[in-house]
Image (spheres, rainbow, N blue to C red):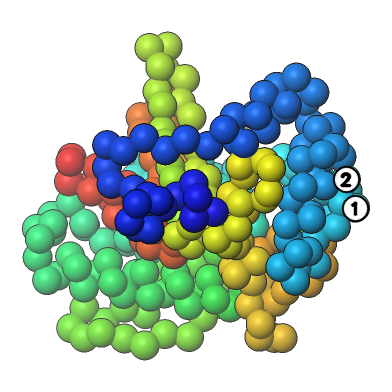
Amino acid sequence: TADIYLDPDWQMPWEPGDTITNPDLADTLELIAEEGEEAFYRGEIAEKIVDTVQKYGGNLTTEDFADYDINVTEPVHGTYRGYDIYSSALPSSGGAIILEMLNILENYDVASMDPESAEYFHLLSETMKLGFADRAEFMGDPEFNEVPVAGLIDKEYGKTQAERIDPAKAGSYEAGEPMPQESDSTTHFSIIDSQGNMVAVTKTVDATFASGLVAEGTGILLNDTLYDFSLDKESPNVIAGGKRPLSSMSPTLVLKDGEPFLALGAPGSTRIITGVTQVISKVIDHGM
């Protein structure tokens, strides 16, 4: 890993403007282009990644790669002052909590507030504390937990949460009681083309330099997203085999009267959720 990401003369990270070469990764991408997904999930790339992980004490197996499936999920949907908001579904917690926080803000005349005022920042911080109390209490992989998403993004629940805020002082909040529902280091980019097609994409390897391991012979930097699990046995996000860790990634689309208006997302771990909420509010409420 250091051979790729550190300057060999100084053993320090490369500076802006330096050129990083990673020929193994180039070969890996060429192999995927030629052989498709089989090369990655069931071929030599999977074998090299597993060999590297096991060499350093990890438990990843080639069967884990072969058995892996991509979940295609419907985005969570809500509205904010007449705008349609679409964002990421579980196991990312971002979309539902963003909608919950926007529903709380919708109970206030945010547009009349000075965006640099103590009043505005107090409202934002209290709203975010309420949202994150619910995130910690309820959010986890929906394949393993019953997550009350419909309740969390319900307008009436947002109103109930808003009523918990004291405009005169900071609060300390336990999770709320959303309406029940039936069982059933990060980079972001947004693109809108000339025809109005929008895409919002967030990708992550989690911490800086991720696991610190490049799978030998592949050039692939391995993520450390298992760190996103909880070790608390009572948490809905507790680590378990076959389970997907909770995420904060929140690629989000905003429509006005059915037409594209805004595509956004962010890096920043749990700050993604609060950042996206602030941007939507700033744009819609203050015309920024």
Q: Residue at x 87, y 39 (%)?
A: 42
Q: Residue at x 79, y 55 (%)?
A: 51
Residue 37: name its quadrant.
top right
| Label 2 – label 1 distance at C-alpha | 5 Å
What residue is pinned by disc 1? 63
Q: Amino acid at mark 1?
A: Glu
Most foreground residue, 34 or 242: 34
Residue at the front extreme, as displayed: 9
Q: Residue at x 85, y 57 (%)?
A: 61
From this view, report whether residue 224 is shown above or below residue 267.
Answer: below
Q: Quadrant of the C terminus?
A: top left
Pointers 2 and 1 in contact (CB under 8 A)?
yes
Q: Amino acid at mark 2?
A: Ala
Residue 71 visible, this orientation: yes
Most foreground residue, 239 or 194: 239
Q: Image check: 177 left or right of 11?
A: right
Q: Image check: 109 left or right of 28?
A: left
Q: Quadrant of the N terminus?
A: bottom right
From this view, report whether residue 83 is shown above or below residue 123.
Answer: above
What residue is pinned by disc 2? 66
From this view, report whether residue 69 is shown above or below residue 59.
Answer: above
Most foreground residue, 82 or 21: 21
